[in-house]
Image (spheres, rainbow, N blue to C red):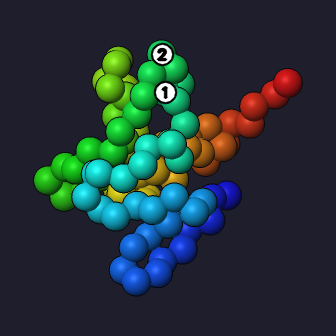
Amino acid sequence: MPKVTQKDGIHYVDGVPVTGTGKVPYEGLKNCPFCNGRPEPREYYYGWYVECTECKGRGPIKDTEASAWILWNNRGRLMGYEHRK
């Protein structure tokens, strides 16, 4: 599972700052599972979600940007799917 920490009012997911502004480094996000495109966090009326900038695939809406990152990066594992080699 990803490690979520908080220091000085800023959340970190696996050491990557998640400020809640949508303007954070995106290298902590995995590529889109549908098209391998670049994802970006987006703010919604009452929360955050991650959306692919190419195919517009997106994750669920969560109350914090950090929660949206976690679900995007662990979408298969959190739903009970494991990658099999």
- Residue 53, compared with residue 15, is above or below; it is above
Number of numbered markers: 2
Q: Nearer the viewer, residue 82 or 10?
A: 10
Q: Amino acid at mark 1?
A: Cys
Q: Is residue 35 left or right of residue 2?
A: left
**Marks 1 and 2: CB-CB under 8 Å?**
yes
* Residue at the image point whose x is 67% and y is 58% from the top: 1
* The quadrant where residue 64 appears: bottom left
Give the residue furthest to the bottom.
Answer: 8
Task: Give, as a three-letter code, the residue at label 2.
Answer: Cys
Picture residue at 37% right of the left edge, 28% below the top:
52
Seen from the viewer's position, the closer of residues 13 and 63 is 13
Residue 65 higher or lower than 50, as above or below: below
Counting from the top left corner in percent of width and height, residue 65 is at 36, 57
Q: Which residue is mark 1?
A: 32
Mark 2, residue position = 35
Q: Can you see residue 4?
A: yes
Q: Residue furthest left?
A: 45
Quarter the C terminus occupies = top right
